[in-house]
Image: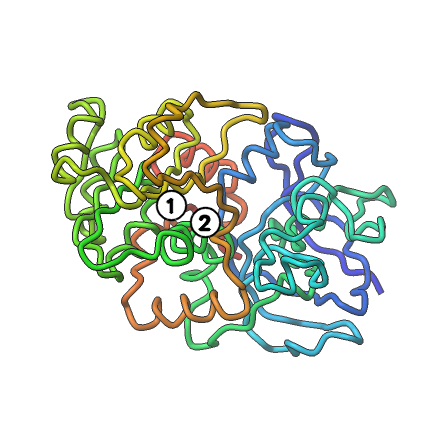
Amino acid sequence: MSTTTRAAVVESGGAPFTLAAVELAEPGPHEALVRIVATGLCHTDLGVASGGLPFPLPGVLGHEGAGVVEEVGAAVTGVAPGDHVVLSFTSCGDCRNCRGGHPAYCATWLPLNLIGGRRADGSSTLSRDGEPLGGHFFGQSSFAERALVDERSLVKVDPDVPLESIAPLGCGVQTGVGAVWNVLKPRLGDAIVVLGAGAVGLSAVMAAALTPATTIIAVDRIAERLELARELGATHTVNPTEESLPEVLHRLTGNGGADGIVETTGNVGVLRQGADALAARGTLVVVGAPPFGSEVALDVNGLLPGKRIVGLTLGDGETQSFIPALVGLVKAGRLPLHRLITPYPFADIDQAVRDMGAGKAIKPVLTF
């Protein structure tokens, strides 16, 4: 039996979110019906809503959901009604990367999560007035009071941790943390630079503060975010509008360069500056996504001292183990995620979008 729920629908590229009644299909064998308690707002949602990606619209976005399971399909074994869950990306579970513990690099990741708008078999999870809507976004489409969620998007979490405080773990936070823990893996005395102090960048700062790195440099143009970065563990901050970024990074890293850099801005000019600031055998992790087709020029000879530039999707984490570990750190107060969150009632989603675009909110979280 289908379920009627209220969702934020994007009618076309560039249109605002409109609250409307939609129909959720009956859960398939590997799906669950989840009552959404909170969901984060991410730049990826805004990019798709603007028409920047070929996701089928009208549709329902949202991919940082957290809620309570209400119903499960016949083949679901990992969760049961009443369980608290964080929702993350989905994956096939059977390709080489999925089997190897790297589901963010699933062979079918793009159609399953970002651009397909339907289940893997082509069927729709959402409709309105009998017409299919784009859905199944990251296996969830959580900008709704209830969501039909793919089993591999479901992560069971500690019910004692408020869901409003951990919804962003599904995408932005695990991306920033994973860039540091899963790729850079700082050693004692390393210098880590985070380019951009948004939700992903500040998550990387918090993660670096839990490693043996002794120099953690946050870079941003907004003074308030740099102040917050210091409070979250940055040892130094840089505002590139006030001083030369290459010169300051050169000085703060003892003229040797950075051992690890996390680039979150999506600005190819900033990416180039990061590549030039690497130490020998240093690694630059590219997280920020510029428009498709963007290119960056690199000094090839400058890369020869063992420098690496690595692209990253969703922190390259295995969600079933990674996200519960992050929840434990939030519960213990060691990952102060609440410092990034600004809550908004679901009905105020467009205000949350405006505030995020204006830099007034680092991580808006819609509450239901």
Q: Is residue 322 left or right of residue 115?
A: left
Q: Quadrant of the N terminus?
A: bottom right
Which residue is label 1 attached to? 199
Give the residue displayed 60% in from the left and 51% down from the top: 105
Q: Mark 1 Cα within 10 Å, few/some/many (few <14, many 20+)?
A: many
Question: x%, y% of residue 213?
Answer: 22, 55
Q: Are marks 2 and 1 in contact (CB under 8 Å)?
A: yes
Give the residue displayed 22% in from the left and 46% down from the top: 228
Classify 50 as above or below 280: above
The colouring scheme, among rainbow, by chain, secondary structure or one colour, is: rainbow
Give the residue displayed 53% in from the left and 23% down from the top: 294
Q: Is residue 121 left or right of residue 134?
A: right
Classify 98 as above or below 83: above
Q: Check residue 172 in the rendering and tell me which mark sits there, or answer none.
A: 2
Question: x%, y% of residue 219?
Answer: 25, 35
Classify 276 as above or below 111: above
User: Who is closer to the viewer here, 202 or 337?
Assistant: 202
Q: Check residue 287 in the rendering and tell me which mark sits there, or answer none.
A: none
The three-letter amino acid code for the residue at tag 1 is Ala
Q: Mark 2 Cα within 10 Å, few/some/many (few <14, many 20+)?
A: many
The three-letter amino acid code for the residue at tag 2 is Gly
Give the residue displayed 51% in from the left and 50% down from the top: 314
